[in-house]
Amino acid sequence: MTIEEIKNLVQGEVVCGEDYLDSRVECVFASDLMSDVLTLKNVNNLLLLTGLSNLQSIRTCEMSDINYMLIVRGKEVTEEMKELAEDNDMVVIRTTYSMYKTAGILYNAGLSAVY
């Protein structure tokens, strides 16, 4: 599934990374605990679904080689977060939907979970 398809499904807004809308996502991991995200091993083309909207979430993605992040619950993305994400060629999308609803939409659309 492409980033653009995901954005449309969740009625999201691309905060940064518009150049990567054709990129493909293979699976999703949903968590607000960045320590859980850091345990993931060798997962390519992963979308992180989170409600944690701060620099720690961007840094965690950077350390975990995760290029796609979807922030739920209408959380705001600060300019500092956006700059750091852009420096790491990340896509950041935000949606007003809850994590539960967003995960359900993506699951029903056929996107796989990590496990």
Image (spheres, rainbow, N blue to C red):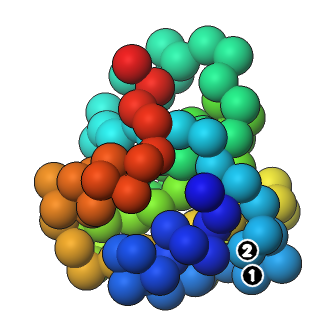
Of 55 and 48, the residue lying toward us:
48
Quarter of the C terminus within the rendering: top left
Q: Secondary structure at mark 1?
A: helix
Of 86 and 7, the residue lying toward us:
7
Q: Disc 2 designates what residue? A: 21
Q: Position of residue 19 (x, y in %)?
A: 83, 78
* Disc number placed over residue 96 in the picture, else none: none
Residue at image location 53% in from the left, 38% down from the top:
27
Residue 74 found in image quarter: bottom left
Residue 17 found in image quarter: bottom right
Q: Position of residue 60 (x, y in %)?
A: 57, 37
Question: Where is 86 relative to 76, above or below?
Answer: above
Quarter of the N terminus within the rendering: bottom right
Q: CA distance from mark 1 to mark 2?
A: 6 Å
Q: Amino acid at mark 2?
A: Leu
Q: Amino acid at mark 1?
A: Glu
Residue at image location 77% in from the left, 61% down from the top:
23
Question: Where is 104 relative to 20, above or below?
Answer: above
| Residue 84 visible to the viewer | no
Labels 1 and 2 touching (C-beta < 8 A): yes
Q: Is residue 75 left or right of residue 84?
A: left
Question: Where is 66 relative to 39, above or below?
Answer: below
Badge 2 crowding class, 10 Å Cα cut-off, few under 14, some 14 to 19, many 20 or more, is some
Q: Disc 1 designates what residue? A: 18
